[in-house]
Image: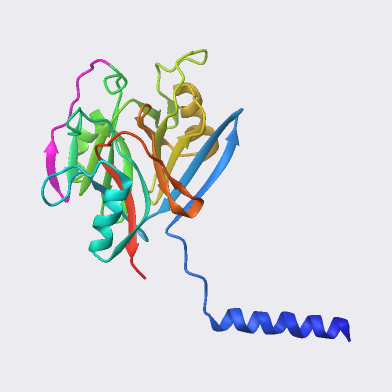
Amino acid sequence: MIERARLLLGFGLAVAISALGPAPAQAVTCNTIDFEENRFTLCEVTLPQETLRLYRTDPLGVPYGHFSELATRVEALGETLVFAMNGGMYHDDRAPVGHYVEDGVEQMRVIATPGPGNFGLLPNGVFCIREGRADVIETGLYLESDPGCTYATQSGPMLVIDGELHPRFLPDSTSRYVRNGVGTSEDGQRVVFAISENAVTFHEFGRLFRDQIGVPNALFLDGNVSRLYAPEIGRSDLGRRMGPIIAVTEPAR
C-alpha cells in the first residue's frame, strides 16, 4: 500500500508539472569551475536565440556606468537584463579607448598601432556582433574583412588567435589580476564570457579559453574593471563606473 501510494504521488506530481508546460529556457547559462588551480565563472550565450548587444550611454548621452542603471533603462523598454559584463577599455570620461560601434553607428575608429598598456599589446582584437552571430576578430583581419558589425568593441590583447595563445604571453609571468574576456566558436553561434575569481596571468587566462572552453579566438576585456551581472547565480558586481557594457536582454514577463 505504501509503495502504491508513492507511485500515485509520483504520477500526480508528473501530471501537475506537465500541465505547467515546459520550463522556459535560460537565456544565459553560468557556472563556476576550477581549471589548473584557478577558479573562473563562465557564462555562455547561444546565438541567434538570444539578444546580445552593447550599451554605453542613455538617450541623453550619459554613460550608464553601473549595471543597475542599465537594468532600469531596459526595464523601461519592456525588457529584462539577464546578463551583463564590462565590455572593453575606456578613458576617464568612459569613452571607449578603441573601436566602438553601437546600432551600426561607429563612435570610435579602429586603433591598429601598438601602444602602451594591455590594449596596445598587439595583436589585439574586436568583439563583433552581427545578425545571427558574434565573433572575436584580430584587428588586422577585421580591417581587411570589414565584417559590417552592428555592435563592436575593440580591446586587447587577444588571448587566443586561431587556436594559439598570444605570442607574448609568458608561462612564468608574475603579473596577476582578476581578468575577464570573451571567446567565440568558429561558426559564431557560441559565445563564452569568463571572469576569474582570483588573480591570474594572461597565460593562465588564455589557456582557459584554448584548453577548457575550446574556442579558436578569445579577447581580453579588462583586468582592473572586471565585473559580472548574472542574477541566475546571484552576481551583480559593484565597483567604479564602467564604459561599454555587453548585455543580454529578454522580453519582460
**In front here: 207 or 87?**
87
The residue positioned 30% from the left and 63% from the top of the image is 79
- What residue is drawn where x is 51% and y is 16%? 171
Residue at 43%, 18% in the rendered image:
169
Confirm whether the magenta stretch covers residue 108. Answer: yes
Q: Point out the stretch of residues depicted in magenta.
A: 103-116
Which of 158 and 1 lies nearest the eye of the viewer? 1
Q: Nearer the viewer, residue 150 or 4?
A: 4
Q: In this picture, is 11 found above or below 79?
A: below
Instruction: Residue 166: tell me if it is visible.
Output: yes
Residue 47 lies in the magenta-colored region: no
Q: Percent from the top left, x then y, of residue 60?
A: 10, 49
In-image side of 107 versus 244 (left or right) = left
Residue 17 drawn at (x, y percent): 59, 78
Q: Residue 24, image x and y in percent?
A: 47, 69
Q: Nearer the viewer, residue 216 or 116?
A: 116
Could one spot residue 191 in this view of the protein? Answer: no
Q: In the rendered view, would you say 43 is above or below 252? A: above
